[in-house]
Amino acid sequence: MLTPSSQLAALAGGGRFTGYRRADGQVGVRNHVLVLGINGLAVRVAERIAAAVHGCVCVATTAGRGQVEPDLTCQIDQLVGLGRNPNVAAVLVVGVDAKTAELIARRIGEIGKPVETVTFAETGEDRLAVLDKGIRRAATLAQQASLLRREEFDIAELIVGIECGHSDATSGIVSNPVVGRVVDRLVDRGATVILGETVEWLGAEHRLASRARTPAIGEAIMNAVRQRENMVAASGHSLTWNNPGEENIQGGLSTIEEKALGAVSKSGSRSIDGVLEIAEAPQRPGLYLMDGPSFSPESLTGFAAAGAQIMLFTTGPGNSFVNALAPTIKITAQAETAQRLIHQIDFDASAVLSQGESLEVEGERLMEKIVDVACGTLTWGEVLGEGLEVLTRIRGSL
């Protein structure tokens, strides 16, 4: 009889994992019921509903009123994308007015996902009534979701977001190249990978563009960076020859260009198949760039809204942020960090520096860890309830 560890090894070796098949054909590695608060007036009641029902995760935006384009569409696309994430079994939309709640619920439900709404409008603005109705509706969704069982799937069903935060010298030398090895393996097996943080391509954007599958994709990569540079220049500042983070400087990085060369190494070496907008879902497998913020909470939210089921997040001295819907594997090659943050780091790649281990071997171990987490093993972020979604804002409200 196979032991749990040998079962996982067999799955990883065969490029398989276990998950939940959704109505639209996607596969989740978690089975959350999402309580989705769609504007600031509904945040607290959405949190209370989720806290009262086992198996629920709350995502609630503090914005939602007085927005104009392109902010309004960006906000709705992110909310809908999070509701459509494969790790979500069902959704309860919590809002103020029925029209907006029904719009978002309808778009989520178009892929066959169970979705309910509860609004202040239907209860005459009675917060306690919203809470009562919301708990009852969420409870029904959670009980129905519990009927689902894991099945075995090919690793090609995975969409993986890759991120770095609080990088140091070990990030560019070890952690990011190890992730790059994994990215190549995933893409070769038919999976999908998304890299974001547009500003952190700066100084290395030409290297990414040289890997574009078509000239148009290459130009889109270069243009995305130019637009970010221009946005900063319009504010009277410059990105070049600066380092944006105190942690980066303390970790031995000298400029944003140096940081970028290390950051893009986590994209591996395969051809780049497109540039996505925030929350835009890839239409076919491959390696994609997402033109979005470098701030990790917003970046990972963009990935989750595009359908990512798992995140790989490298760090040097440590970074506690994780995504709410997609388990986030925290990776470091800094031995001191791994020892100090034993309840935060999920994968220690420091053997490359301390024992001369190869990047390829560490890449194989990380692939096994991805399968392990996909099959249900909790990350430290999940265990400690660190998850959050932070929607991107483009401009202020009216």
Image (cartoon, rainbow, N blue to C red):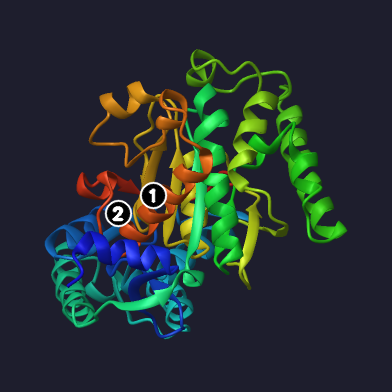
- Secondary structure of residue under mark 1: loop
Mark 2 residue type: Val
Q: Residues within 10 Å of mark 1 (few under 14, many from 20)?
A: some
Residue at image x 19%, y 75%? Answer: 142
User: Number of numbered discs present?
Assistant: 2
Q: Nearer the viewer, residue 67 or 175?
A: 175
Q: Is residue 72 left or right of residue 260?
A: left
Q: Nearer the viewer, residue 218 or 220?
A: 218
Could you tell me which quadrant the N terminus lies in? bottom left
Residue 168 seen in this snapshot: no
- Mark 2 sits on what residue? 43
Up-down: is 297 above or below 134? above
Residue 57 in the image, given as x and y percentages of width and height: 26, 60
- Mark 1 sits on what residue? 62
Mark 1 residue type: Thr
Rounded to the nearest angstrom, the CA distance separating label 1 from label 2 is 7 Å
Residue 362 in the image, given as x and y percentages of width and height: 45, 42
